[in-house]
């Protein structure tokens, strides 16, 4: 095969033309290069497991199997050819012999390339080196690859096959996730771990009688967080609509309606910058429980994270690829040991911790000008455009949040930073709110939810004033939500957890684009 190492100094136009020529050759011979299906009997790993250990010198054949997947290695030797076929479970060796499959089928192998999807049937046997192999009796082209995948080289080091990636550019891998997944088994494992995490979280919440629900993504009025929304226009109704920035207000409407434990795992959208921890489209878990407060929700979060961590660990610790490991740097995932959650997590008081970090008795007594000067000194950009609540938030990020490593609850935020949280019992200048931080990033945000509609109206109006003054992240007054609250909302605890950031933390992934299958990126 002429293109075993695509991605190097190869004329891709020439290589792709050669593959099209092989496609034409298949068609001329009456071979369909893109099949409708294949009756696979075993995945590669299951097929390999069928062969018991052989006695010394024994060459017994095993059962016949039908396997399908991509060609990832190819070694032709005249009348015999060895190949490796990879599928989601791993890989298995194939052995083609001209005398056994016939000249007609064997000659078809000249039209095969790395990356082609094929189906093979035949009995299993062990080679002299002990490798379980399919002795091909029949081979079928299932999908001809017209573009070479960027497979790397492999070598055996101390008995272990080491893979050197030919596709290491992080941005290109994010743009072409399909190619990244096709050539990097460890990336496929990473996203299986993400799925396992979400499944475990669902199972945890379902087990304690939470109901999974769906709320609108297109909303006539955005709210539940401070963020700039994406806007659109509905032609039939002739009205503006917003992609939701949070699920909160609709989920709490359900609490009013008598669905006392609800959760949603879905996408939210915020029209803001892109960096290592922010993507405009992201996955959030929000869950709300009637008759609970933030103390109970801290316990829920601790148990949920232990459950999620265990699920990710089970997948990430699987030995993958039959002893194959990648050489050099990983994609950013799994560099660090899996975090060891040991509840209860430590707690920090927001006001005392920030005041101590800034060397002032009480940061809340500083006026806006003093906060702006402190923020500028801390390196916060565009200080002149920030509202007082935003200045406080930025100062906390700079002085405290960025320095928290192990999972830690920060509790009791100021009222002006928490428009949807209940005042703290005994100190109405603060709220019953906590955020969970680890490795310098926020993982969860939670409240004893405000259920006083009169107080909620005052806070909405304060937000509306900030919006009118130019704060494009502030929300307005949601009259329908206030109406729902006026029917009577039980005491409620609520939590929001960013699934992407949580997964980054659990796997040591350094960039959010490596935790999302298809991140938002600038057009090529």
Image (cartoon, helix red, strand yellow):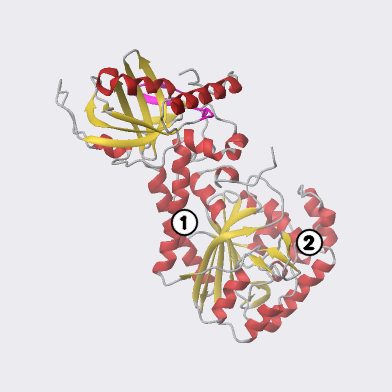
Q: Which mark is residue 34?
A: none
Q: Mark 1 highlights which residue?
A: 198
Nearest the eye: 78 or 285:
78
Near mark 1 (Cα within 10 A), the count class, few <14, some 14-19 or many ≥20, is some
Numbered label tally: 2
Nearest the eye: 474 or 78:
78
Q: Position of residue 126 (x, y in %)?
A: 23, 25
Helix, strand or loop at mark 1? helix
The residue lying furthest to the top in this view is 78
Q: Is residue 304 above or below residue 256?
A: above
Q: Is residue 222 above or below residue 151?
A: below
Q: Is 158 colored magenta in this rendering?
A: yes
Q: Residue at x 54, y 38 (%)?
A: 332
Q: Position of residue 350 (x, y in %)?
A: 64, 62
Q: Position of residue 80 (x, y in %)?
A: 31, 17
Location of the N terminus by quadrant is top left
Is 297 displayed left or right of 141 in the figure?
Answer: right
Is 356 displayed left or right of 196 in the figure?
Answer: right
Helix, strand or loop at mark 2? loop
- Which of the 4 quarters of the picture holds residue 39? top left
Disc on the earlier residue, 2 or 1: 1
For the magenta stretch, what is the residue range? 146-162
Q: Residue at x 81, y 71 (%)?
A: 465
Nearest the eye: 264 or 315:
264
Nearest the eye: 459 or 488:
488
Q: Residue at x 44, y 47 (%)?
A: 192
Q: Which mark is residue 472?
A: 2
Q: Say whether residue 53 is visible.
A: yes
- Which of the 4 quarters of the picture holds residue 88? top left
């Amino acid at each position: 095969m002429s293109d075993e190492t695509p991605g190097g100094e190869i004329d891709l136009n020439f290589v792709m033309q050669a593959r099209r020529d092989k496609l034409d050759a298949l068609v001329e011979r009456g071979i369909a290069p893109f099949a409708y299906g294949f009756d696979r009997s075993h995945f590669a790993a299951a097929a390999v497991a069928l062969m018991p250990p052989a006695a010394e010198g024994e060459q017994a054949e095993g059962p016949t199997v039908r396997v399908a997947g991509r060609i990832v290695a190819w070694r032709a030797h005249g009348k015999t050819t060895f190949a490796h076929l990879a599928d989601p479970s791993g890989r298995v060796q194939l052995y083609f012999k001209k005398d056994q499959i016939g000249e007609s089928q064997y000659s078809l192998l000249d039209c095969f390339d790395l990356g082609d999807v094929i189906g093979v049937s035949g009995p299993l046997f062990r080679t002299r080196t002990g490798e379980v192999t399919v002795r091909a009796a029949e081979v079928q082209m299932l999908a001809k690859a017209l573009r070479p995948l960027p497979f790397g080289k492999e070598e055996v080091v101390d008995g272990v096959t080491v893979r050197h990636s030919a596709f290491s550019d992080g941005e290109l891998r994010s743009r072409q996730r399909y190619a990244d997944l096709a050539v990097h088994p460890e990336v496929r494992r990473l996203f299986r771990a993400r799925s396992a995490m979400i499944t475990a979280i669902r199972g945890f919440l379902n087990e304690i009688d939470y109901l999974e629900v769906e709320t609108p993504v297109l909303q006539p009025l955005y709210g539940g967080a401070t963020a700039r929304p994406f806007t659109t226009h509905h032609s039939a109704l002739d009205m503006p609509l917003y992609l939701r920035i949070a699920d909160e207000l609709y989920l709490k409407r359900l609490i009013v309606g008598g669905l006392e434990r609800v959760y949603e795992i879905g996408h939210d959208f915020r029209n803001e910058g892109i960096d290592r921890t922010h993507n405009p489209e992201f996955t959030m878990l929000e869950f709300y429980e009637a008759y609970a407060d933030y103390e109970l929700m801290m316990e829920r979060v601790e148990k949920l994270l232990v459950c999620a961590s265990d699920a990710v660990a089970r997948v990430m610790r699987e030995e993958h690829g039959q002893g194959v490991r990648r050489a050099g740097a990983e994609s950013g995932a799994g560099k660090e040991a899996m975090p060891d959650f040991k509840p209860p997590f430590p707690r920090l008081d927001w006001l005392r911790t920030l005041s101590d970090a800034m060397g002032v008795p009480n940061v809340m007594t500083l006026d806006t000008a003093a906060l702006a000067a402190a923020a500028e000194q801390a390196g916060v950009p565009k200080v002149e455009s920030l509202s007082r609540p935003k200045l406080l938030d930025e100062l906390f990020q700079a002085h405290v949040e960025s320095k928290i490593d192990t999972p830690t609850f920060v509790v009791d935020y100021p009222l002006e930073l928490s428009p949807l949280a209940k005042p703290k019992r005994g100190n109405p200048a603060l709220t019953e709110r906590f955020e969970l931080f680890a490795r310098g990033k926020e993982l969860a945000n939670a409240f004893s939810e405000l259920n006083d509609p009169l107080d909620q109206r005052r806070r909405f109006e304060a937000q509306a004033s900030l919006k009118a003054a130019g704060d494009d992240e502030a929300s307005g007054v949601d009259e329908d939500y206030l109406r729902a609250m006026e029917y009577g909302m039980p005491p409620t605890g609520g939590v929001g957890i960013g699934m992407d950031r949580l997964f980054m933390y659990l796997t040591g992934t350094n960039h959010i684009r490596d935790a999302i299958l298809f991140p938002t990126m600038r057009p090529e």
